[in-house]
Amino acid sequence: MAVWKTKCGGAEILIKNMDHLPPHCHVKHGGRDVKVRLHDLRPWGTSELPSGVRKCLREHQEDMLAAWDTVKVIPAGKAWEFED
């Protein structure tokens, strides 16, 4: 389940209601799920995002940071207990 979700730039962007730190969103684009840090909007790893998706992330950054405050944070090493 998501606490925040939108579609733009050809991608679905969401913040899950239970997730791990650091604060991030999931960008589903081109068959991939790319995690993007909310504070600097940089993808984890070597993933690149299209310019339309990057623009959308910038436009919604403040709302996503506010939404993260409602996320139930999963302790490190406990993610398996909360999987759907």
Image (cartoon, grey):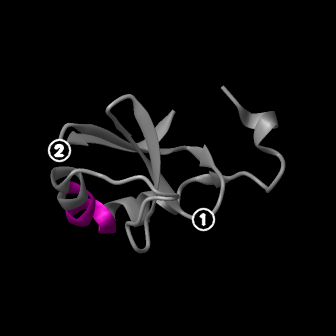
Query: Could you say which disc has been placed on residue 71 in the image?
Result: none
Residue located beneath label 2 in the image: 9
- Which range of residues does the magenta coloring cover? 56-62
Q: Residue at x 79, y 36 (%)?
A: 80
Q: Indicate yes or no whether the magenta region holds residue 5.
A: no
Quadrant location of the C terminus in the rendered image: top right
Q: Residue at x 53, y 56 (%)?
A: 70
Q: Secondary structure at mark 2?
A: loop
Give the residue at the far front of this rendering.
46
Classify residue 61 by image quadrant.
bottom left
Q: Position of residue 17 (x, y in %)?
A: 55, 44
Kind of residue at badge 1: Pro
- Residue 20 to residue 28: above or below: below
Residues packed near mark 1 inside 10 Å, few (<14), some (14 to 19) or many (20 plus): few
Spatial CA distance of label 1 from label 2 is 24 Å
Q: Indicate yes or no whether the magenta region holds residue 61.
A: yes
Q: Position of residue 24 (x, y in %)?
A: 50, 58
| Residue 66 falls left or right of residue 30 | right
Residue located beneath label 1 in the image: 22
Main secondary structure of the magenta stretch = helix
Q: Residue at x 37, y 66 (%)?
A: 41
Kind of residue at badge 2: Gly
| Residue 27 falls left or right of residue 84 | left
Classify residue 64 by image quadrant.
bottom left
Q: Residue at x 31, y 68 (%)?
A: 62
| Comparing labels 1 and 2, the label whose residue is closer to the camera | 2
